[in-house]
Amino acid sequence: MVVGKLRPATVTVDLAAIRHNVKEEIKRLDGHSELFAVVKADGYGHGAVPVARACRAAGATGFCVALLDEALELRAAHFTEPILVLGITPANEAAIAAANDVSLTFGTLEWLQAAAENLAAHANTPLKVHIALDTGMGRIGFREEADLRAACDYLTAHQDTFITEGIFTHFATADEKDTTYFKQQAKRFNELVAVLPRRPKYVHVSNSATSLWHAACNGNMVRFGVAIYGLNPSGRGIPELPYPLQPALSLTSELTFVKMLHKGDAVSYGATYHAAGDEWIGTVPLGYADGWLRRLQGFHVLVNGQPCEIVGRICMDQFMIRLPEQLPVGTTVTLVGEDHGATVSMQDVADYSHTIHYELCCILTQRLPRRYI
Ligand code: PLP
């Protein structure tokens, strides 16, 4: 996709905020724990490579991604730290991971056997692996002790092929106030880990929510994700954070067209909005093709610190707002972020569009240029 470098619409990423969030979390870890920065999905839409650099500068000692391709992007950018792919990579890509010193996740004996075949044919270096345990997330990983034991036996018998670097699980409800299910998962994790003949280098269970609110069971590495970007993993569910997170992302644009409409004049597809009287209407050059969801009709953006309603349907590349007065073309429009003391947060946008801020960050498309400050 073409990056709109010549357009007046920009995602600005504040790397100082990212460094702040990572440093604050590292301060809370015990001296033996490491922080791996989760930079999958292009750093939750913020840009994986610049974010990873900022995290490393702030003390992160490794990275987590979702895809082998994302790991290779970091290697191509000369990151030498450990990189773990959190999802299941096709076993026939094992040799590529080994050659690039990328650690892969597995959750079945069959995967190990298939990966061993690929490594035997194509690799001359062992593959680092992390054992995924499904303690209640229902996504990937071993659920039964017998299956885990069989895999451990296989690993013991194939130490030239695999280095067992880690074991982990993922919590389904770490961001919720009710800790009942969380505790069940933690208990199951300890039962399953006890099956291992020896503890691997990394034992890890914590995403942002776990690390922020359940630090006691962090293991010795945390997979710190959304909080890096300054977003509360619980949304508004648990507002009490151990330290204030600084949101890193803002989204701004400019008015490209301003006109007065008169009573009854319509705006946008379907003519769903009609001016109630004389109204100044501004056009903002950004739309659902940029990830600014169509269902944000009726929400607001900031102009000179004032909320301005989005009127009419959001188009693919443009939307319209009702202005408090005539304003010049080129006036700044803040879709996400701060403007003259007022703020629209990703959480505000998420609430209005009935989703979570995670999703909104990830769907800001590559057409929007990223600027780093
Ligand atoms: N660990 C795993 C296995 C994940 O899937 C994710 C994100 O989805 C994370 C860690 C990071 O989670 P968060 O962004 O909530 O910190």
Image (cartoon, grey):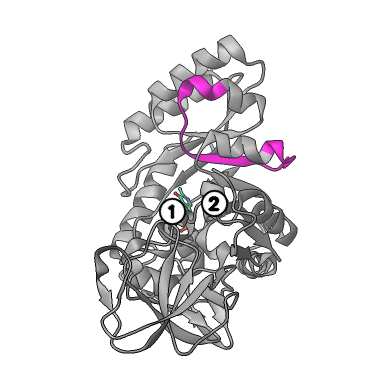
Q: Give the numbered dot on residue 367.
A: 2
Q: Give the numbered dot on residue 91.
A: none
Q: Residue at horizontal 64%, vertical 54%?
A: 5
Q: Quadrant of the C terminus?
A: bottom right
Amino acid on which the number 1 mark rests in the picture: Ala
**Crowd around label 1: few <14 · some 14–19 · many ≥20 (10 Å):** some
Of the numbered discs 2 and 1, the one sitting upstream in the chain is 1
Labels 2 and 1 touching (C-beta < 8 A)? yes
Q: Residue at horizontal 66%, vertical 31%?
A: 101
Amino acid on which the number 2 mark rests in the picture: Arg
The residue range painted magenta reads 75-94
Residue 76: image quadrant is top right
Whole-percent x and y of residue 193? 44, 43
Residue situated in front as seen by the camera: 50 or 236 = 50
Find disc 1 in the rendering and name its residue: 289
Q: Specify whether tag 1 is near ligand 1 (CB below 8 Å).
A: no
Residue situated in front as seen by the camera: 223 or 331 = 331
Q: Residue at horizontal 36%, vertical 39%?
A: 140
Q: Is residue 174 visible?
A: yes
- Using the numbered discs, state the Cα–Cα distance from disc 2 to disc 1 in whole angstroms: 8 Å
Q: Residue at horizontal 39%, vertical 66%?
A: 175
Left or right, 117 with reference to 321? right
Helix, strand, or loop for circle 2?
Answer: loop
Answer above or below: position of 349 versus 343.
above
Left or right, 91 with reference to 99? left
Query: Does residue 209 show up magenta in the picture?
Result: no
Whole-percent x and y of residue 264? 26, 81
Whole-percent x and y of residue 131? 47, 36
Answer above or below: position of 26 versus 300.
above
